[in-house]
Amino acid sequence: MRAAQAPSARPQPRRKASLLRRFFSTLGPGVITGAADDDPSGIATYSIAGAQLGTALLWTALLTWPLMAAVQMMCARIGMVTGEGLAGALRKRFPKPLLIAAAVALLGANVINIAADLAVMADAAEMLSGINSHVLVVVFGVAITVATVRLRYVQIATVLKWLALVLGAYVITAFLAHPHWGRVLRDAVVPSLPAGREAWATLVAILGTTISPYLFFWQASQEVEEEKAKGRRMIVRREGATTGEIVDRKLDVGIGTFFSNAAMFFIILTTALTLHAHGLTKIETSRQAAEALRPLAGPLAATLFTVGILGVGFLAIPTLAGSAAYAFAETFDWSQGIDEKVQGARGFYSVLVLATTAGIALDFARINPIRALFWTAVINGLLAPFLLVGILIVASDRKLMNGQPSSRLGRAAVGLATLLMFCAAAGMFLF
């Protein structure tokens, strides 16, 4: 009897390994999108929030996690069940001039975002290498553009997925600052309304950089790219999604948004415990933020903060340029996709290259990268709720969604996110 039972016990480790492999295999678009959310714009915004207001806005990290997850999952579902990107789906419900205006606004915001991201990355790299930041802006911009154009989607997705690990740098940095966890917990779970227009603008910026328009387009388009990578080149072959595929993506999006908001939480906490606590409430450059951390939290904390900026910048810029390219290609019904050859998708690649090139050029206009990043987040916070209304309409349309509309709970969560962003925008102008 024992001899008969022994073989049945052996496969258990293999089953566990198989479950583990399946878990990691589900991680992809959601993790990449979540990590890209913490781009240098996000880091700048969260740093400003922590430096100006201390831990007063820590609660936003907990609030925005389920809302961001609901929004990203709704965008993912649109891509999965329609077989098209977000702009392609919106095109079936809204006038083309409205979509063109939205695509132009997205491109403008993304170009400013790319310019500021490159400037912040170059400033951070100059601290580590001593190389002039203007030279590094060109090097980073060209390298990212060439890699995005030349590499296949699977290769880019793999690299971006591993770059998401740099978010752990901000968790470590926060612990090096030795927080008082009782007070941290209180500010994290007890919301406090902003006082004054500047504080309301900071809240709008946090919402705008967390629930950001370019991520809506990127998430849906990544779903299409995933399908294309499996050989489903025609829209009709990409339509619909199995229950298992939707569950897997919910897990992927949930994990990606969790780590994104965890990084947000610890960036606010780090700058609150160091910069705000020592009266350094005005941050003008990434160099200032990192150098201020050095005497307050130690050289390791400053280095981790700097390395984190570089890592998320390399992750976010392809996302920013790519989302604008997808939005234009789907609006005008151009051939599009990272796996397409340049000759077959000239319009798509032209917008992608234009976005990064314009970002490089803007760096030489001597913009203040931290303030530009912050106000880009504010612009995104004003634009996002209008886009969310359109997304809700599409996601609720049973015919357009091929009989698989978003759930009532999902629509309620996205509706709440939309209302919250409208209220925050109103607060910025009224208070």
Image: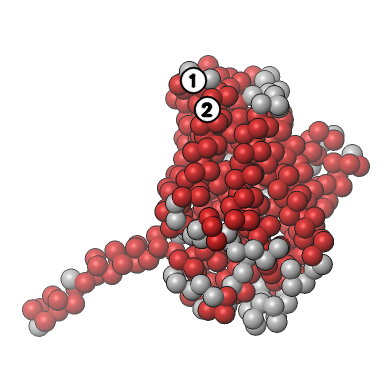
Marks 2 and 1, the one that precedes in the sequence: 1
Q: Where does the C terminus fall, quadrant-wise?
A: top right
x and y, in percent, of residue 342 in the image? 53, 55
Which of the two residues, 35 or 261, is positioned nearer the viewer here?
A: 35
- Residue at which label 1 appears: 131
Which of the two residues, 196 or 79, is positioned nearer the viewer here?
A: 79
Could you tell me which residue is drawn at 79 percent across and 48 percent down?
Answer: 382
Residue 363 in the image: above or below residue 331 = above
**Crowd tier of the residue under label 2, counting other residues whose Cα lies within 10 Å: few below 14, some 14–19, many 20 or above:** some
In the rendered structure, the answer to whether residue 198 lies left or right of residue 347 reads: right
Residue 14 in the image: above or below residue 155 = below
In the rendered structure, the answer to whether residue 275 lies left or right of residue 372 reads: left
x and y, in percent, of residue 288 in the image? 61, 20
Q: Secondary structure at mark 1?
A: loop
Residue 171 in the image: above or below residue 284 = below
Could you tell me which residue is drawn at 52 percent across and 63 percent down?
Answer: 225
Question: Which residue is most to the right?
Answer: 430
Could you tell me which residue is drawn at 58 percent across and 49 percent down?
Answer: 319
Q: Specify the amino acid type for callout 2.
A: Leu
Q: Secondary structure at mark 2?
A: helix
Examine the image and state in which quarter residue 135 appears: top right
Could you tell me which residue is drawn at 49 percent across and 65 percent down?
Answer: 226
Examine the image and state in which quarter residue 98 appears: bottom right
Q: Where does the N terminus fall, quadrant-wise?
A: bottom left
Q: Is residue 263 visible?
A: no
x and y, in percent, of residue 227 in the image? 50, 69
Q: Is residue 346 visible?
A: yes
| Number of the label disc, if any, that sits on residue 136 | 2
Q: Are marks 2 and 1 in contact (CB under 8 Å)?
A: yes
